[in-house]
Amino acid sequence: SVSENQGRPLPRYARVNTIKTTVEDAIDYLKRDGFTYQGQAKSLEDLGQLSGKNFCSDLHLPDLLVFSSNTDLHAHFLYQAGHIILQDKASCLPAYLLSPPPGAHVIDACAAPGNKTSHLAARMSNRGKLFAFDLDPKRLSTMSTLLLRAGVTCQELAHMDFLKVNPQDPKYSQVEYILLDPSCSGSGIVGRLNELTDNPASSSEERLQALARFQQLCLAHALRFPCLKRLVYSTCSLHSQENEDVVAACMQQHEKSFRLVALLPEWPERGRVPLTQCLRASQSKMLTNGFFVAMLEKKDSEEKAQT
Ligand code: SAM
């Protein structure tokens, strides 16, 4: 059965691709096209109440526009031309929070189909180096198309197992930012046939454990890049085994050199205690797909001395 969690359909989100346009120009275009702009939302209720051709700016994320749940922009010029990216609000958190500056060297470890990669490139003003890896050739080719449409040029795509990427390779010696969005159960995706609850074979604790082991390996591997300053870990899973537990296990090993960053104080839905620095998102509370985000930051030498 299709997940009916809370019944309420999600609003539609569109991220403005600042490589190709500005938020103001996108809003103007939509207004001329018959949409009614309601300004910036003041509360989550404003997002839930959108109807017809009304739209607004999001209250948490600056480049995000929000439309009523029955809006379909796939055929729209702004989407076709890569001026907007149709991306759920929660999945815009990782690149927004990692926030690599223009010119930075960045790794997107499990990157395809590349919505977060294109968002990272926008954060970098398309300048610097964006190394993007994925194991799946089909998803990588989708990603090339998507990045081309979005006007991204700072990327270097590689068909590679991230766990086999050598952190000591001089190529990566300036990498300071890593986005890690590894394969997960997908249990947060609203409206997806939920395998974990519907199919006993794949709902097994074993499957979750295997995913969690993979996620932990990826996270530990990412922390081996010698110049890493900041890392964002995210999943679209609701299971703490894939979220807080992965991050907590990693922090136990690395608390001397990394700390967890307290993210967006204005975001009400937090990681499970004690990892309240992290964010969660859910259909019922945040009007998004289910999601988890953690950010780790390298301690400076003074901080290290104190621990
Ligand atoms: N970040 C992507 C985005 O925003 O569009 C979504 C990534 S998806 C959650 C996880 C991806 O990890 C899949 O495309 C999968 O092929 C890839 N993957 C799985 N194992 C991998 C590995 N060992 N190395 C690199 N990529 C891997």
Image (spheres, grey):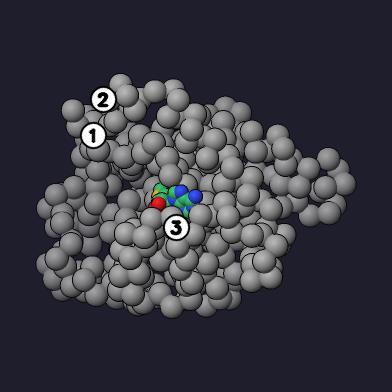
In whole angstroms, how far apart are the C-alphas of marks 3 and 1?
24 Å
With 172 as the anchor, is 75 left or right in this view?
A: left
Q: Residues within 10 Å of mark 1 (few under 14, many from 20)?
A: some
With 243 as the anchor, is 64 left or right in this view?
A: left
Quarter of the image where one finds residue 92: bottom left
Q: Which residue is mark 3?
A: 134
Quarter of the picture holding the N terminus: top left
Q: Residues within 10 Å of mark 3 (few under 14, many from 20)?
A: many
**Quick one: 189 or 173, which is closer to the camera?**
173
SS assignment at label 1? loop
**Quick one: 305 or 55, which is closer to the camera?**
305
Q: Residues within 10 Å of mark 2 (few under 14, many from 20)?
A: few
With 1 as the anchor, is 287 left or right in this view?
A: right
Amino acid found under the numbered disc labelled 1: Leu
Closer to the observer: label 3 or label 1? 3
Residue 198, disc: 2
Closer to the observer: label 2 or label 3? 3
In whole angstroms, how far apart are the C-alphas of marks 2 and 3?
28 Å
- The earlier-in-sequence mark between 2 and 3 is 3
In whole angstroms, how far apart are the C-alphas of marks 2 and 1?
7 Å
Q: Position of residue 134 (x, y in %)?
A: 44, 57
With 42 as the anchor, is 210 left or right in this view?
A: right
Amino acid found under the numbered disc labelled 2: Asp
- The earlier-in-sequence mark between 2 and 1 is 1
SS assignment at label 2? helix
